[in-house]
Image (tube, rainbow, N blue to C red):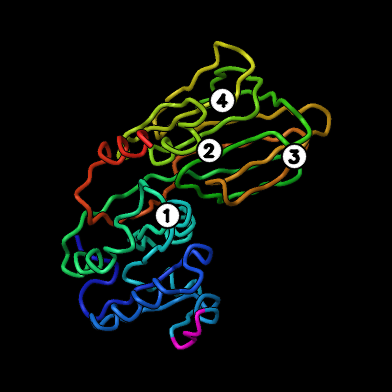
Amino acid sequence: MTLHGGEGMKKVGILPNLEKDKDFAVTNRLLQYLKLKECQPCLSMKAAKLAGLEEYGCLEEELYRDSDFLISLGGDGTLLGVGRKSAPYGTPILGINLGTLGFLTAEEKNHAEYAIDKVLAGDYKMEKRMMLQATIATDMERIEGILALNDICITRGLLYKILEFNIYVNEEYVDTLRADGVIICTPTGSTAYNLSAGGPVLKADAQIIAITPISAHTLTSRSIVVSADDVVTVEINPREEADFTVSADGQDAWTLTGKKVVQVKRAKEYASIIKTNPQSFYDVLRQKLSR
């Protein structure tokens, strides 16, 4: 499978986590390596200015749209943010891990050049990861186009202990839950918050969605797995004017009050993840769960 821009000089966007690469040592190292490989590296304007590499700065939209591939420097959380922004353009992402073991990153920072060499040589696997699209609706407004690679979560506010919500799948009533919240996740997100809440582990390439209650107040509440083509609707009935939060990948969030309806379905966009390491999903799963 060829990269985003086909043949010729590769334009490569570098997207560092500014907390994990504070001195930009890894960013600068990979930038210089890409130049040696006759690639055109680029950074966001903000990162370029902070790193003193202004000549490599470009507008964010151009970075995500025009790069042949992107290098996400950080952990899975960093890659999730890059994934949401790159998905509309289909730009593939190479994840270089600067933290603990991740499911999405391709290599550790000490092997980053090795991973880049494999990508440039065409020796890699491309994984198309399913994403979710959410809409928040009331009688007065609609918030549309919310993208998530891991999950859409609805969680209670700090001062209130419980939410009540009705769950529908394809407009068919499923159940009314009283819980601290609910997680609607992709297979990619099944090993994140969903797993901590007691939800199932889903194989990364499965075409399914899991619905998992958070700290449900009944013993019979369990996760439900539905088809990726199903539409999940959550009708929230908070007590009085209690606040609650709707979040995408735990990063983009909206704090709301009153009765709201959240609709979640498969997004038309995919996150394109580059894999250069032969470790399987189950290899990583065993390592992560044994820690």
Report how far apart the C-alphas of labels 1 and 3 lie in the structure: 43 Å
| Dot 2 or dot 3, earlier in sequence | 3
Residue 90 is situated, as x and y percent measured from the top left of the image, at 36, 60
Q: Which numbered disc, 2 or 1, marks the residue that appears first in the sequence?
A: 1
Q: For mark 1, what is the residue?
A: 99
Q: Which residues are magenta?
A: 51-55
Give the crowd class for mark 1: few <14, some 14-19, many >=20 residues within 10 Å: few
Residue 109: x, y in percent? Answer: 33, 63
Q: Secondary structure at mark 2?
A: strand
Mark 4 and mark 1: span between their CA atoms? 29 Å
**Residue 218 falls left or right of residue 212:** right
Residue on which disc 4 sits: 213
- Asked whether disc 4 touches disc 2, contact meaning CB atoms under 8 Å apart, the reply is no
Q: Nearer the viewer, mark 1 or mark 3?
A: 1
The residue type indicated by label 3 comes to Asp
* Numbered mark located on residue 147 in the image: none
* Element marked by disc 1: loop
Quadrant in the picture for residue 176 = top right
Q: Which mark is residue 264?
A: 2
Query: For the point 76% across and 44% down, which residue is it?
Result: 140
